[in-house]
Amino acid sequence: MEGRSAMSEKDRELWDKLREWGVCRVAAYLNLLEAGKGEDQKQNDGYQESMLSLEIHDFFRMGREIPALPNISAGEGLFKLWQRLELDGFELFCVILAMLSELDYHFEKLFVYLNNDWNQRLLSVEWAMHLYTMEPEPDGFCLSHFLPDGKLAKQVFDIQSEGACSGLRRGLKLKPHILEFLLCSGRLCSKPYLEWNPDTEDFLSAWLEESVCSCLESAEWRRTKHRKAVLFHLWGDGKRELFLYPVWYAQKRGQPLGVMDYRKMQKDLEEDWQKALAALEEAALAEGILCVHNAEYVQKDEEKSWRFTWFLQCAAERVKALFLIGSEKGKGWKVPGNVDYIPVEIPLPEGGRRLLLWKKMAEEYPVSEETLSQSAVFYDFGLQEMEQSLRDAWRITCARRGQEMSAADLHEACRSQIQHNLKEWAVLVENHYGWEDLILPKEQKEILKEGVDQIRYRQQVYEDWGFSRTRSYGTGMTLLFTGPPGTGKTMAAQVIAGELGMELYKLQLPFVVSKYIGETEQNLRRIFQEGRKSQAVLFFDEADVLFGRRTEVKDSHDKYSNMEAAYMLQNMEEYTGVVILATNFPQNMDSAFKRRISIRLEFYFPDYENRLLLWRKSVPKQLPLEPDVDFEDLAGRFELSGSSIKNVMLHAAFLAAPNKEEVGKRHILRALKRELEKSGQYCSEKEFLPYFM
């Protein structure tokens, strides 16, 4: 018999017996018909005999008794189909005969002969009834099985109408998934649109949130006779981790799990939905659970939306549990009344669980626990991002011929995994500075280092030592830098970001603040959302514009200004990242913001010692410098900010460059004069003579 290579031994033995039984059944019925015919009619029908092959004549001459359905394949394909679809005797009879034509081409010839039609190679509705009842007249009970809403038409057969065939002459062709189920002895086979029991991580329990698992388990007792199916809609940022919940749910119940990726079903709409329905039928046949991945794609097309509602209705009739998983909360489809809809947002791992997963994923890599701890603090990653980051970091380590993965390698790899849109409102500030470049009084620098440690060790303090339960606001970090322009506020922000291995984004106020009501709040909401994705340091320069004092409401302008401030305050409380605020006018900021500041640092004009350091550090090693340049004199005579000192040396270099001269005192003083004039300061002839021109 053809087409049986995937069958089990038990099923092959069963179908061999059923083949003999099928032939005998047909032969017995034809003998009954022959016995009732007259001699003339028998002669007129002689031409039909020529249609039969020698093999079919041999089958007719078989004199064996018709065996009952043997129970030799319990637990295999046909037995499972019989049980799970609750087939009655006639339905099972039709399945067996239709399957025989798929297994043995002789049965195709036989059905051609019975149908008296070369084009009809399938068992017809008429002959299914004749062979079952052994009567020449159609049976009403059998005929009722082929109604459009009957089990045979909906779940078992694609009822064919070949050419002019209709009504009783329609052919019975097994649905593809039924045929596959029988051919594979009830084993589940994956397809391009449906994967059964995909591989998962062996540390499943380390990932799962107990609260989510409890929610899924509690759905069992919510099922009633009116709500037979449960629809779990899981959404969140993690991709692989979302999928682990249906895996856990199926494993706990000992049921197979079928996963259908909706993203792959975007070509032929009608064909796609037929595949979706076939997936449901397979899940029902396997007594399994169906999981639809990337379900958010349904929302993007109105046509798909109503079809998806129909799909959910079909699911309620076939499976007890259906999972929809995607990155967005479901919108645009209606849940049928007989489905218990349970939406659950799946958070990314936090605290100790995130570190545990980093350690588990990094078992094969030479990396220290401290490096992993830093990544666990800074990056809200799921399993997929963790795995890819470690793989990329190891490539970076190997490229520099390192023996152990460094924190810098892992930070670089992690940043490459992050996708965000912060550049719509902010500009990326490149960092080229370290602690040695930041010239500040010792006490101020110590405060900044304490701030870095608060960010770096917040996992230990908040989670391991339990301070997260005693903090009324979020676990984010907010620093306020105040002081006149050019005193090092931006450089300090760059140093902090560099020490933490994070990017620094400076918010551009014209793209944030809008004259239209509500648009500023919308921009702020999106900025903080993208900030969470990027894990970047958000730097608000001129922060007093956004964080200004709330005032008594006298007109609509006051009302909406206060709303902006309140909304900003709310986002600050909930944000878990690092925010740096800089302002020249701290007195204009709302007191509520000041209370939520983790560290406040005042930046002053540098004193003589620091000015001298700044002058010396502003000279690159490659710069040709005349020996008569007296930095002590410059530091003592001119009270400049660090930014102004850098500008002076840069301008002096450009003054010397056209003549290829060494940079001397005359170039520096002329550049210094221009710098002072920019800020409106008076330049006396005594100080700059003879370079006053």
Image (cartoon, grey):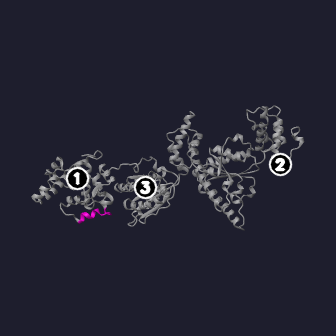
For residue 448, above or below residue 166: above
Along the viewing direction, whichever of 92 and 598 lies nearer the viewer: 92
Comparing labels 3 and 2, the label whose residue is closer to the camera: 3
- Is residue 404 visible in the rendered image? The answer is no
**Cα–Cα gap, marks 3 and 1:** 35 Å
For residue 685, above or below residue 96: above
Q: Is residue 666 left or right of residue 479?
A: right
Q: Is residue 570 left or right of residue 440?
A: left
Q: Residue furthest right?
A: 686
Q: Earlier in the sequence, mark 3 or mark 1?
A: 1
Q: Residue furthest left?
A: 39
For residue 627, above or below residue 220: above
**Cα–Cα gap, marks 3 and 2:** 70 Å
Say which residue label 2 marks: 680
Report the predominant secondary structure element of the magenta stretch. Answer: helix
Say which residue label 3 marks: 269
* Residues shaded magenta: 140-150
On the image, which quarter does residue 552 sit in?
bottom right
- The amino acid on which the numbered mark 3 sits, given as a three-letter code, is Leu
SS at circle 1: helix
Disc number for residue 112: 1
Would you call the spot at circle 2 few (<14 residues within 10 Å), some (14-19), or many (20 or more)?
Answer: few
Q: Position of residue 654 (x, y in %)?
A: 77, 37
Badges 3 and 1: C-beta atoms under 8 Å apart?
Answer: no
Would you call the spot at circle 1 few (<14 residues within 10 Å), some (14-19), or many (20 or more)?
Answer: many
Badges 3 and 2: C-beta atoms under 8 Å apart?
Answer: no
- Is residue 414 visible in the rendered image? The answer is yes
Q: Earlier in the sequence, mark 2 or mark 1?
A: 1
SS at circle 3: helix
On the image, which quarter does residue 509 sit in?
bottom right
Q: Is residue 176 left or right of residue 409?
A: left
